[in-house]
Amino acid sequence: MIGTALADEGSPRSRPELFTAKKTDLFTSFRDRLADHFKIPAQNIRFWILNARENKTRRPGTLIRDEDLELLLGTIRRKKAGSQADLCLYLKLLPESTRRGIAAPPPNQRLLSFKYFNAEEQTITGAFKVLVDVELAISHLCDIICKRMRWPHKMQLRL
């Protein structure tokens, strides 16, 4: 299963789409094929390599940068996906505000995914993604989480 652990496999929208490609295909050709399939401009999407985690889930981890677009898919998998047998990707549609002139986040930023699980109610009430600097202090991360969840500022969190 690709994506977050929030997916309901019974829903067609939650099932990941699988695309096959040759290792010798250029990444730009693959990107253009997906853009055509989803009917979105190729310049408005970014791809992240999904990293396997210890708990058997996958999360976006490594951005495929603009300078990597002319590489072969096999080269990208070998250089960026490490020991993974398959190249599993997360397609992110850029927000309208970032489409003009901003190609990609700086290399020192990472995409983090969050979800809030209410143990008492057994519900997930918040799920979001945010780009953060790799050197960001945990206290700043708590501020970001509180703001996105509309919780009181300086609320104590257990991460």
Image (tube, helix red, strand yellow):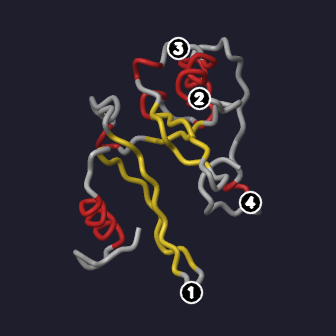
Q: What's the mark number on residue 121?
A: 1
Q: Disc 4 versus disc 3: distance between alpha carbons?
A: 33 Å
Q: Residue 2 at x, y = what percent? A: 66, 47
For marks 2 and 1 on the same chain, the one whose residue lies earlier in the sequence:
2
Q: What is the quadrant of residue 44 in the picture?
A: top left
Mark 4: give few (<14), some (14-19) or many (20+) Cα within 10 Å: few
Give the labeled residue for mark 3. Answer: 71
* Residue furthest to the right: 10
Q: Are marks 1 and 3 in contact (CB under 8 Å)?
A: no
Say what amino acid the circle numbered 1 marks.
Glu
Mark 3: give few (<14), some (14-19) or many (20+) Cα within 10 Å: some
Q: Disc 1 versus disc 3: distance between alpha carbons?
A: 47 Å
Give the labeled residue for mark 2. Answer: 82
Q: Residue 96 at x, y = what percent? A: 34, 43
Q: Is residue 151 above or below residue 55?
A: below
Mark 2: give few (<14), some (14-19) or many (20+) Cα within 10 Å: few
Mark 1: give few (<14), some (14-19) or many (20+) Cα within 10 Å: few
Q: Is residue 89 left or right of residue 12?
A: left
Q: Is residue 106 left or right of residue 75?
A: left
Say what amino acid the circle numbered 3 marks.
Leu
Say what amino acid the circle numbered 2 marks.
Gly
Q: Disc 3 versus disc 2: distance between alpha carbons?
A: 16 Å
**Helix, strand, or loop for circle 4?**
loop
The residue positioned 71% from the left and 32% from the top of the image is 19
Give the labeled residue for mark 4. Answer: 9
